[in-house]
Amino acid sequence: MSQATRARPRPHVTLNSDGKRHPVGNSLAVFTLVAGVVAFAFGFVVARHAIAVWVGLAALAVGFCVQLVSATREQRIVVVTGLVAAFVGVMLGMAHGGF
């Protein structure tokens, strides 16, 4: 029963699975995710359709560039999630009135 008393290590969440630091790529990937979620959320609010479109377009532009130079699988997962959210936010914003 010695295994019951051992502490389990906490999972380590990182975007640097290759062991190298990628501060610019990581920060742009997180920006894409956050801006995509903001565009997605504002896409549902009819009065904020312009914000959804502009923030979503910014997230799409940055996200596509980061996707080209991403170094790790984890970065790509974060970027694609942000891109999908940004696309849906832009399309909802366009449906509610566009720019």
Image (tube, rainbow, N blue to C red):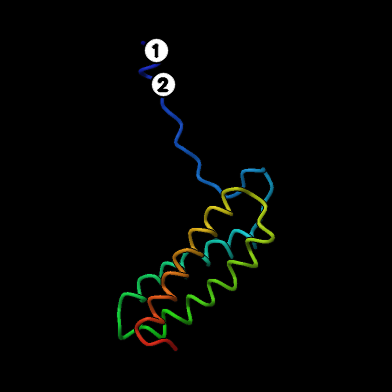
Q: Secondary structure at mark 2?
A: loop
Residue assigned mark 1: 2
Rounded to the nearest whole Å, what is the CA distance between mark 2 and mark 1?
Answer: 7 Å
Q: Nearer the viewer, residue 28 or 4?
A: 28
Q: Residues within 10 Å of mark 2 (few under 14, many from 20)?
A: few
Q: Nearer the viewer, residue 26 or 96?
A: 96
Q: Amino acid at mark 2?
A: Arg
Q: Amino acid at mark 1?
A: Ser
Residue assigned mark 2: 6
Image location (x, y in percent) of residue 14:
55, 47
Q: Which mark is residue 46?
A: none
Looking at the rendered image, the quarter that the C terminus falls into is: bottom left
Q: Nearer the viewer, residue 96 or 56?
A: 96
Image location (x, y in percent) of residue 42:
36, 76
Image location (x, y in percent) of residue 51:
42, 83
Left or right, residue 92 beside residue 34: left
